[in-house]
Amino acid sequence: MSDCELQKRCMGCLRFFPVNAYPWKDKRKGQRRSRCKSCTNARTGAWRALHPDYGKRWREAHPEYMTTYAQARRTAARAERSTHEEPQCDPESIDDTNSFSAL
Ligand SMILES: [Zn+2]
């Protein structure tokens, strides 16, 4: 089975490409998109060009998402920091009676 037999036609440019020229639609199911990578990129790029501030407007339309998301991130960062914090060293608590027993 060669790659030539696995060609499929792009719905965008109507040219034939090997299946690996098509981005995954659902990798688990083995499904690929109907447009080749360059057509997909062109469409995505065109959409982005038409909606340059989509992300900004979405964030403005969903401020509560951003605050909860930012809060979750801060909480996660704080938890991360506390786990990596140096353990507090209290000289009184150090049990050195067994420290050198192995020597
Ligand atoms: Zn194409």
Image (cartoon, grey):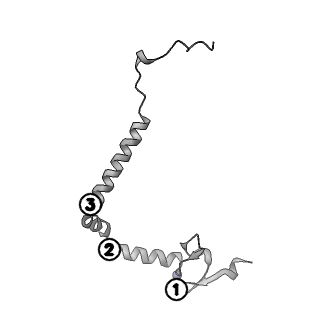
- Tell me which amino acid carries mark 3: Glu
Q: Which secondary structure, mark 2?
A: loop
- Contact (CB < 8 A) between labels 3 and 2? no
Task: Return the disc, 2 or 1, that comes first in the chain's sequence.
Answer: 1
- Residue at point 73%, 77% (across, down): 2
**Counting other residues with Cα less than 10 Å from the Cα at mark 2, is it few (<14), some (14-19), or many (20 or more)?**
few
What amino acid type is highlighted by mark number 1?
Answer: Met
Residue 44 horizontal/vertical position (percent): 42, 74
Residue pointed to by mark 2: 51
For the image shown, how many numbered marks are present on the structure?
Answer: 3
In the foreground, 57 or 64:
64
Q: Residue at x 43, y 36 (%)?
A: 84
The answer to whether 82 is drawn above or below residue 45 in the figure is above
Q: CA distance from mark 1 to mark 3?
A: 39 Å
The mark lying in front, picked from 3 and 2, is 3
Query: Residue reaching furthest right?
Result: 1
Where, by quadrant of the figure, is residue 54 drawn?
bottom left
* Disc sitting over residue 11 in the figure: 1
Residue at image point 49% right, 79% down? 39
